Image (cartoon, rainbow, N blue to C red):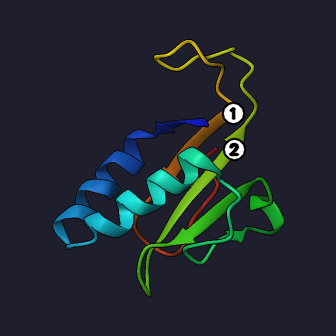
Amino acid sequence: MFRVDVSNRAEKDMDTCLSAGYGRQLAEIMNTVEEDPYKPTHGFKRLKGDLKDFCSRKINRKSRFVYSVLPNDERAIDEYGKLYDGIVRVHEAWGHKYKKPT
C-alpha cells in the first residue's frame, strides 16, 4: 500500500472536480493509486520528456490526475504499523496542461 500526499494545488483541483460532479471518478483513482500507482486503469499514462518521473490518469475527457511515486525514505507506517511501499504525491487533479513544479 502507498501513502497518498496531496499538494495544495491538487486539493483545490479536487474541490473543483467534486463540484463538477466527478467525485466517483476521483475516489476510484485515489483508491487505485493507494493500492498500486502503476495499475493500467483509468487511462494510465507515464509522462515523457521533462515530466518523465510523473504519471497521470484520466478523470474525464479533458482533465487528468497527475502524480509522482517516491520511495518511502521517511520510513512512514500506516495506522497498523505496516511500512508503506512508497509515497504517491498528487500534483494536479483538474486540467490537461501540466507544468512541472519548480
Residue 100, percent across and down? 64, 54
- Distance from the alpha carbon under mark 1 to that under mark 2: 7 Å
Residue type beneath disc 1: Gly
Asked which quadrant contains residue 74, the reply is top right
Residue visible at 80% across and 69% down in the picture: 48
Residue visible at 65% across and 53% down in the picture: 37
Residue 22, percent across and down? 28, 71
Residue to which mark 1 is pinned: 86
Residue to which mark 2 is pinned: 69
Residue extending furthest toward the left? 19
Residue 94, percent across and down? 39, 66
Q: In this view of the protein, which residue sits in the foreground, 53 or 44? A: 44
Q: In the picture provided, is 92 more to the left or to the right than 20?
A: right
Residue 9 lies, with reference to residue 66, above or below; the image says above
Q: In the picture provided, is 73 more to the left or to the right than 78?
A: right
Q: Residues within 10 Å of mark 1 (few under 14, many from 20)?
A: many
Residue visible at 60% across and 41% down in the picture: 88
Residue visible at 60% across and 61% down in the picture: 99
Q: Residues within 10 Å of mark 2 (few under 14, many from 20)?
A: some
* Picture mark count: 2
Residue 81 lies, with reference to residue 19, above or below; the image says above
Labels 1, 2: front one: 1
Residue extending furthest toward the bottom? 61
Q: In the picture provided, is 18 more to the left or to the right than 14?
A: left
Tell me whether circle 1 and circle 2 mark residues in contact (CB < 8 Å). Answer: yes
Secondary structure beneath dot 2 equals strand
Q: In this view of the protein, which residue sits in the foreground, 19 or 29? A: 29
Residue type beneath disc 2: Val
Of mark 1 and mark 2, the one earlier in the sequence is 2
Secondary structure beneath dot 1 equals strand
